[in-house]
Image (cartoon, coloured by chain):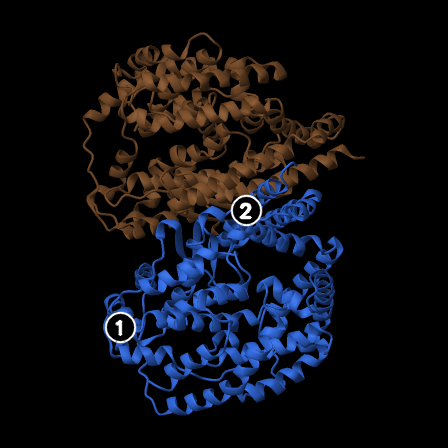
Chain colours: A brown, B blue
């Protein structure tokens, strides 16, 4: 072991190959596997997870990370930093805690599927308390090792370098103006007539339309596929990106924009630098940055009037012509605002309030300021304040709606809204360089967008921690002002 | 390690899970993966192969096998016997030989793809000599460990318990009557008119037809799938069997019978006993026994007049009615005989002569009785004698046509024809129990076939070596007489 960094590269290359197997069989499980394959698949994936954990936490890896930090090579420093992040998440947690967390999470999530439908908060609470307890222990251990607060130590797993001290003022800013804006827009839209599309829309035609739009968005079909799964996702590996959607014969609106969303994730993966593809340095920066790509594609570009003008003829070509497919009507369909109870069904404008509500609750929970039993009352209070909706007694459409908390993925929620704000900040930077961007989009020239994202985000992979990446890309730290400007322009000024 | 057998079960369960990953990503590579995914996939699969080899050859495994043999439990004895077979194939070969074999095979196969098209025997010979050299070394090592002859030691990898001493008299028997039978049938068929089906046959309809026939054949769609690949195969795992076919719009005949063939493989896998699924004891007995299932489905059942009568209405339902779809004409289409140059295109009657030719040549090659340079002359001589065809100077359609020898898979070829003869012997046994079998088939009752195969083959997995399996199933050792009787009945007596 003369060169500790070379040793690390060897171990992480092995992990990269194991991860390839995990990603492909994971995609297959969601998109291809028949039901009777599940038990054997789960056992094989669990065996692989053990192998990956053992490979990552082998005795020599920690020592080599310590030794390899002693270098003047900035790229190697960054590479070792990202190796250490993966190593830390695996090596700092005692096996007993990992096992307890996995067991508690699996049990809680499994029962939740029934309990949510049954509106059974009391039943859920019994299984959830151990999940929260494990997450708190994990947070404490990670906090001790990183010097972060407990909650921030969990956030750091998804959004490296991002802390509550950065997030909170930005979310507070949002809270100051977004609820009022929502009310204004809802009032404005009440006067507008929207023509509903008339189906059915054969799935084969929706798929052909989706694939044509993926091609316009630069998806490389020699390095990826589009398939179907119950929950749409972007999976596979950088060299072979697998995105999925779900079709309904009576509605193409959701599936189509879902494809645009996943294509944003996919292009990030497809353009990650191949020289680093086998190293932690070469993976996507974070969940929030990943979401900023899907939301740049879906929200900034996809639901914009010029883009809808660009694809309206394709909608007509594949699905037949009808009044609902007029550009102005497509714009209305894709920018309808309605404060609802369910996050995953929320529109661009109300979505952040769902996330802020969860951020505030889960942070207090992990920091020990509240207990699991306190969650429903807090949920009701914030839902009334932020979105004017009453959720009292309705756990199904309240605090039991998300899967994230059931298996202990605390710290993940902020990524969604950080992603939306990053995306607005990227597009502000692109528009500063290209004042005629909307005309370019309407004319079918999306190169200014792809070129900027490629240079500033895709090619950078995990070279910088998130705050540094933002400043290098846009010359400024994250601010909510671009997001506000974008929302006002789209929802009030047109 | 108090209980050596328990230790072995643990190691082989781990291997079974790794094999699951290998099978699924292997299927994906052939049926789903876009081109740019290949390099990363190959690296991941190679890493997994190393892992599986290391797991199988870990120091404690050999010792545990030795210790676990000391048992009165017959099932455990059989289980350890099959573990040892896998272990021996991996552990007896020095790493250097494995590497040399892999390198030589990869290089030879890669160049062969071009050389075959270019009719370049001289170029091929240069790459092939090291492949043969490695195979001879492997055969020598395996022969020393097993007491078998060199060639038999290679055959044993594919057909446990089967030896040249058993195969040769049976193939000699075939050689005595099959060339004459072929001539008789060709002469008889020259007088017959066959109506060619008129396409196009849309692929979606061919798929629907194929799936309906798979259902009739008992394929469990909750435990498997039908997809498309360049070279049809049966892959996946016992719990989740993936079969493929390839469609042509202008011809449904091949694709349809290909689906019947692969469904035979699939049902064997789907019905392997679940109690042993994680052990070598629980896998399919051999390549020849596997082929006996696909050929039982394709040749014994699929191309029979009663089965074609059963599915003719389905062909008409999915592809529309036309004169070619009359039962009598379908029978002619599916029993046409023509001595050709290419094994994979051969009909039921001429196929065995292609195999016998290869068996005789590869055995002499491995036993050291001939050298690689001698192969073309021998090929020409045997092709003329067995099928009356002249291949002199035509390497493309002669000794360069198969992939098997390019990567050193010597000993595999006999499995094809052994499979055809096993299948005839199974059906003779089934007919002895069910004299009205043809009427049952035509009436849509295939249960007598499935029940017999399930009891005698599928449920037995690797419990017995091949010769014992045959005797237990049919009360007699393998004989060519059932195959002869079947061919005469089908091709001369109807």
Query: Which secondary structure lies at badge 2?
Result: helix
Please identify the quadrant where the C terminus of chain A is shown: top left
Q: Are marks 1 and 2 on the same chain?
A: yes
Q: In the image, is B87 to the left or to the right of A374?
A: right
Q: In the image, is B481 to the left or to the right of B56?
A: left
Q: Quadrant of residue B111?
A: bottom right
Residue at the extreme right = A2
- Depicted A381 relative to depicted B357: above or below: above
Query: What residue is at 30 percent from the left and 45 percent from the top?
Result: A312
Q: Which residue is mark 2?
A: B16
Q: Which residue is mark 1?
A: B439
Residue A191 position within the rendered picture, expressed as x and y whole percent measured from the top left:
18, 26
Residue A350 position within the rendered picture, expressed as x and y whole percent measured from the top left:
33, 23
Marks 1 and 2 sit apart, C-alpha to C-alpha, by 42 Å
* Viewer-nearest residue: B42 or B313: B313
| Mark carried by residue B101 | none
Q: Earlier in the sequence, mark 1 or mark 2?
A: 2
Query: Which secondary structure lies at badge 1?
Result: helix
Q: Nearer the viewer, mark 1 or mark 2?
A: 1
Residue at the extreme front = B72
């Amino acid at each position: 072991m003369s060169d500790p960094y070379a040793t690390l590269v060897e171990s992480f290359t092995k992990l990269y190959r194991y991860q390839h197997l995990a990603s492909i069989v994971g995609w297959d499980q969601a998109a291809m596997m028949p039901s009777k394959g599940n038990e054997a698949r789960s056992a094989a994936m669990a065996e692989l997870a053990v192998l990956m954990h053992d490979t990552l936490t082998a005795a020599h890896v920690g020592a080599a990370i310590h030794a390899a930090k002693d270098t003047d090579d900035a790229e190697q420093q960054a590479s070792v930093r990202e190796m250490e992040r993966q190593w830390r998440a695996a090596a700092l947690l005692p096996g007993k805690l990992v096992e307890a967390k996995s067991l508690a999470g699996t049990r809680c999530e499994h029962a939740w599927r029934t309990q949510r439908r049954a509106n059974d908060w009391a039943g859920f609470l019994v299984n959830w308390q151990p999940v929260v307890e494990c997450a708190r222990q994990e947070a404490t251990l990670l906090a001790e090792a990183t010097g972060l607060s407990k909650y921030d130590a969990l956030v750091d797993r998804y959004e490296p370098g991002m802390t509550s001290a950065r997030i909170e003022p930005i979310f507070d800013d949002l809270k100051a103006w977004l609820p009022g804006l929502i009310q204004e827009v809802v009032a404005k839209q009440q006067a507008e007539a929207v023509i509903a599309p008339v189906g059915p829309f054969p799935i084969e035609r929706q798929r052909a339309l989706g694939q044509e739009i993926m091609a316009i968005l630069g998806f490389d079909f020699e390095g990826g596929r589009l398939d179907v799964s119950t929950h749409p996702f972007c999976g596979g590996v950088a060299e072979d990106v697998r995105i999925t959607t779900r079709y309904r014969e009576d509605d193409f609106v959701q599936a189509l924009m879902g494809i645009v969303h996943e294509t944003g994730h996919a292009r990030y993966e497809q353009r990650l630098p191949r020289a680093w593809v086998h190293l932690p340095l070469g993976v996507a920066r974070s969940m929030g940055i990943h979401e900023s790509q899907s939301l740049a594609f879906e929200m900034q570009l996809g639901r914009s009037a010029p883009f809808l003008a660009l694809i309206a003829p394709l909608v007509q070509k594949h699905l037949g012509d009808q009044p609902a497919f007029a550009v102005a009507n497509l714009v209305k369909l894709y920018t309808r605002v309605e404060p609802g109870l369910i996050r995953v069904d929320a529109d661009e404008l109300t979505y952040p309030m769902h996330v802020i509500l969860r951020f505030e609750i889960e942070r207090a929970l992990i920091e020990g300021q509240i207990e699991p039993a306190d969650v429903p009352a807090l949920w009701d209070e914030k839902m009334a304040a932020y979105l004017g909706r009453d959720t009292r007694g309705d756990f199904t459409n309240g605090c039991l709606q998300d899967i994230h908390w059931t298996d202990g993925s605390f710290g993940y929620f902020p990524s969604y809204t950080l992603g939306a704000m990053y995306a607005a900040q990227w597009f502000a930077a692109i528009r500063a360089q290209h004042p005629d961007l909307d005309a370019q989009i309407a004319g079918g020239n999306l190169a200014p967008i792809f070129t900027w994202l490629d240079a500033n985000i895709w090619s950078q992979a995990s070279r910088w921690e998130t705050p540094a990446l933002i400043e290098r890309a846009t010359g400024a730290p994250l601010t909510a002002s671009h997001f506000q400007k974008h929302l006002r322009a789209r929802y009030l000024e047109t």
